[in-house]
Image (tube, rainbow, N blue to C red):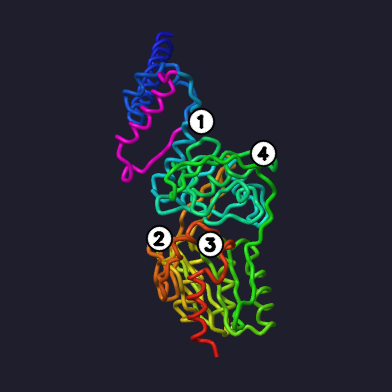
Amino acid sequence: MKNRATLIRTIAIALVCSAISFIAGYFVSVGTLVSWDVMLTRPLTDWFKQQYALFFDKSQVDIENIEAFNRVKNLLNSRYYKPVDVNDLLEGAIRGLAAGTEDPYTVYYNPEEMRKFLEEATGNYEGIGVLVGMDENYILTVGDVFPGTPAKEAGIQKGDKIVKVDDEDVTVIRDIDLIVKKIKGPPGTVVKITVYREEIRDYIDFQVTRQAINVSYISSKILEDGIGYIRIKQFDNDISEDFRNHLNSLLARGIKGLVIDVRDNPGGDYREVVRICDMLLPKGLIVYVEDRAGQRKEEFSDENYVDIPISLLVNENSASASEILSGALKDYNRATLVGTRTYGKGLVQQIDMHFTNGGGLKYTIARYFTPSGVCIHEVGVEPDVEVALDEALRNKSLDDIPHDKDNQLQVALAELRKKMP
């Protein structure tokens, strides 16, 4: 009997010691992970609730940053002047991870933003009718205003800097897609657009009624001396087939040379510009991308191409896909580039949608290179003949400039005539 009592007492003592050891170990572990300062500022009972943890490699992260993160979260959650939604705080922190790359093309989208981002990129949308791009300071800038659209009727001009949308400061947003989604909306609704216009050095407010916008990103015509002209405003997801149709129509009418105009073209679909290059280049490398491991993915053209003299019009707003076309045609000496140096966006983005919350991450995965091995990111493509648009025309849409007044086009035509039979 005595031995049994001793055994029970021993077991009880062992259990108590185990419990104490477990609790002590738990708090030591948590205290080491989140810092003792954070632990001591939270009610004891909170630490017995189910917890989630974020893990970082010790060799990559300083413990002081982990402690700072946890302390900020805890102070906001417990002492901020009004209750906060910790999920909102965490979403902001996730955005901060992407922003920490200091790459404006790497952005986290919450579920609603991701849904909107995946809307099909075609010429049909609901908005105000402008083509936009980021300037060198990542301020959204109007590159073109489509005829017959609400933006045109309201008086928005090419070159206007969009600084606010519905009184929200968008100069702090570096992702173009996020700002564009704020401008778009259901037909009949009104959006307030605040722009900074450099020519008057002042801000202007526009109340613009959204409507269904149906625009064509490509147009063509025949100019004097049997010269064809094709303007591509953006490389949307079916532009290569449209380009083929326009080009074949011009060829059927006997053109002897071709001007391709990608001025103010912010880019678009990588696959579509590769298909267009294939129509214009002899057999060979068009472009390649290279990731952090040095792995290359190459795109090639076949032996079939349209062999006529070409002039390519470019400017400082010709970006991304426009620069793939520019770089390839220049490297093969297939076109004379006329205008000003291009924007300089040579990065390739990828979308990861494997988020359980429905969100996604657009991130830069690689750089692209011209056939000669040049990465034009933050450098651009230099024209063969540099000529700036006349100052008086700088803020006019190209659609509003008569061809005989367009000095860049006139130089492109002169260069083309030198090569025509």
**Residue at image point 41% right, 51% down:** 103
Q: Are marks 2 and 1 in contact (CB under 8 Å)?
A: no
Image coordinates for residue 233, horizontal then vertical, percent: 58, 63
Name which of mark 1 and mark 3 comes first in the sequence: 1
Q: Is residue 387 visible?
A: yes
- The residue that disc 1 covers is 87
- The residue that disc 3 covers is 265
Name which of mark 3 and mark 2 comes first in the sequence: 3
Measured in 3D between alpha carbons, the distance from the residue under mark 1 to the one under mark 3, in whole angstroms, is 39 Å
Measured in 3D between alpha carbons, the distance from the residue under mark 4 to the one under mark 1, in whole angstroms, is 31 Å
Out of 160 and 7, give the one closest to the viewer.
Answer: 160
- The residue that disc 2 covers is 292
**Residue at image point 47% right, 78% down:** 336
Image coordinates for residue 189, horizontal then vertical, percent: 67, 38
Name which of mark 4 and mark 1 comes first in the sequence: 1
63 magenta-colored = yes
Amino acid type at image mark 2 = Arg
- The residue that disc 4 covers is 189
- Secondary structure of the residue carrying tag 3 is loop
Name which of mark 4 and mark 2 comes first in the sequence: 4
Name which of mark 3 and mark 4 comes first in the sequence: 4
The segment highlighted magenta reads 53-81
- Secondary structure of the residue carrying tag 2 is loop
